[in-house]
Amino acid sequence: MPRVSVYLTWLCLLLGTSALAAPADSQVQGYFRDLKSLQADFTQTILDERSRTLETSKGQMFMQKPGRFRWDYRQPPSQLIVADGQRMWLYDKDLQQVTVRLLDKALSATPLALLSGAAPLEDAFIVSGSGVRDGLQWYELRPKEEQPEFKKLRVAFNGDVLKIIELEDAFNQRTRLSFEHLQRNVPIDPGLLRFVPPQGVDVVGDVPR
């Protein structure tokens, strides 16, 4: 199962010198505060503690605040994750199984709460600038409360364009989401942000009654 599925029960964002505090607050908080919608192609890469690639997946994502998103994994494996504002649906096409979770339970103070608008940035994270690397401006985000799934996030921008969200867990493994063809604050087809389980699949979890 793609690591983003694991960390969906993981995706959000100033300790540091005074010289870094102002730009970190301005760019990171400003970007996500003003974010209404997002769509992009993504590459998800899982790296070990030595930065060796363990797994790579590709797909397309859509997000609309508050609490609606779609992560469509297309190569490999075949999996779809949809949040409709109330529930999050994880559809594993190979297993023909859908797992349903209430959105508040699924997100909490996780990285996807950052994109979905489920939690204000400043409520959950401490942000610090971490400099320029590979031509990108990087920021580090640490959760204010200890999280079992991850210990910190990194966010990278090329100018004012979001390029990377990277999660590091307690074992120093990293899950990196790299974005291409990103479009910010554009209309999203509402049908992409709803999910109806296909006939014949097993549906488990917080199923609507």
Image: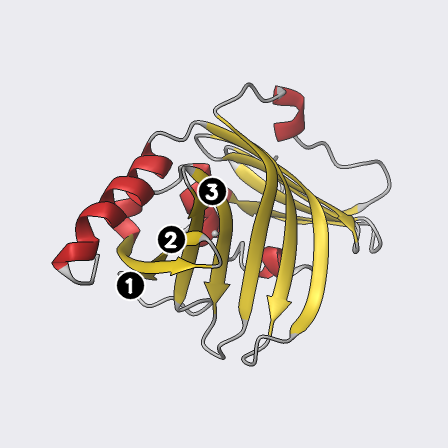
At a point 64% along the width and 56% down the height, the residue shown is 44
Q: What numbered label is drawn on residue 145? A: 1
Q: Residues within 10 Å of mark 3 (few under 14, many from 20)?
A: many
Measured Cα–Cα span from mark 2 to mark 3:
20 Å
Q: Which one is earlier in the sequence, the residue at label 1 or at label 3?
A: 1
Asked if residue 62 can be seen in this view, the reply is: no
Q: Is 67 or 30 nearer to us in this picture? A: 30
Return the x and y of residue 147 as percentages of the image width and height: 38, 66
Assign a secondary structure to mark 1.
loop
Depth order, front residue of 172/19: 19
Q: Could you tell whether 124 is left or right of 206 in the image?
A: left
Residue at x 26%, y 61% (from the top left corner): 144
- Of residues 178 and 11, the one nearer the viewer is 178
Question: Pointer 2: what residue?
Answer: 109
> Do the residues bearing badges 2 and 3 touch, measured as CB atoms within 8 Å?
no
Q: Which of the colour schemes (rainbow, by chain, secondary structure, one colour) is used?
A: secondary structure
- Crowdedness near tag 1: few (<14), some (14–19) or many (≥20) residues, C-alpha within 10 Å: few
The answer to whether residue 99 shows anywhere in this view is yes
Residue type at the position of mark 1: Glu
